[in-house]
Amino acid sequence: MPPETARVSKTNESVTEIHHVKLTVLPLTPERWPDLQTIFKGRGCSIARSCWCMAYRRSGSQAQPPAGTTRAQANKAQLKALVDSGRPPGLIGYRGKVPVGWVSIGPREDYARLARSPVMKPVDDKRVWSVICFVVPSEYRNQGVARALLAGAVAYAKKCGAKLIEAYPVDKARRSHDDFMWFGAKSMYDKAGFFEVARRKPHRPVVRLKAG
């Protein structure tokens, strides 16, 4: 089976169709911030509402949030500041005009925690883009949304000049609880053409795709 692909327009818009699931995948920009909030407010996304995709962007101990601010609120504000700076930290998938999923992707150096992770630390010194997590509300799961997001993320990374794309999926015979599947299943990456390059723990491989 050939790897799943998406076509990308000059505006970095990708359109992916997998098993009749057609998604338009777009970078997260300031005007699309409300759509990300809609996704994170969805059913089954409580962890995302706490992390706001900031956990792997930091390394070491965290400063206490300002008085009267929760950790989740501080994380949300930091991600919003990143978006407002003009650096899209990931992509949103739309079914029509409805936002149905999120994927966090960017150059590995954007994710400081990876360098210290016993599972996800660099395999070598090659420059890679990292796929970190997927967020899909419960009502849109098991419909090919994550696979379409991955295809869109690969297309976007290629458009941005990536030569290698790396990910850190879960590889178990039985599916884990959704709360532990933010990294995606290895089988999904296999179908997209990724290959294994390291495995530091039995169920957590490091996989790559040659994009150039």
Image: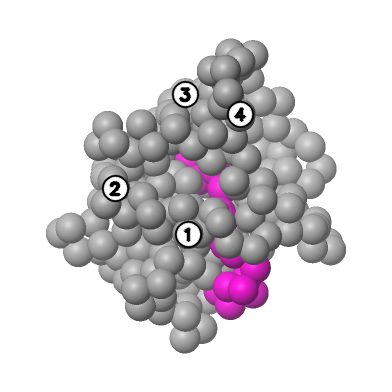
Q: Nearer the viewer, residue 2 or 138?
A: 138
Callout 2: few (<14), some (14-19), or many (20+) C-alpha neighbours within 10 Å? many
Report the amino acid beneath label 4: Arg
Task: Give the percent coordinates (x, y) of residue 160.
Answer: 26, 45
Callout 4: few (<14), some (14-19), or many (20+) C-alpha neighbours within 10 Å? some
Identify the residue at horizontal 74%, vertical 50% (top origin): 180
Residue 43 image-quadrant placement:
bottom right
Q: Provide the residue designation for mark 3.
A: 125
Please give left or right for residue 159 compared with residue 153 in the image.
Answer: left
Q: Provide the residue designation for mark 2.
A: 29
Q: Provide the residue designation for mark 1.
A: 38
Residue 105 in sight from this viewpoint: yes
Label 1 to label 4, Cα distance in Å?
19 Å
Identify the residue at horizontal 54%, vertical 40% (top origin): 52
From which residue to which does the magenta span run?
130-144
Report the amino acid beneath label 1: Thr
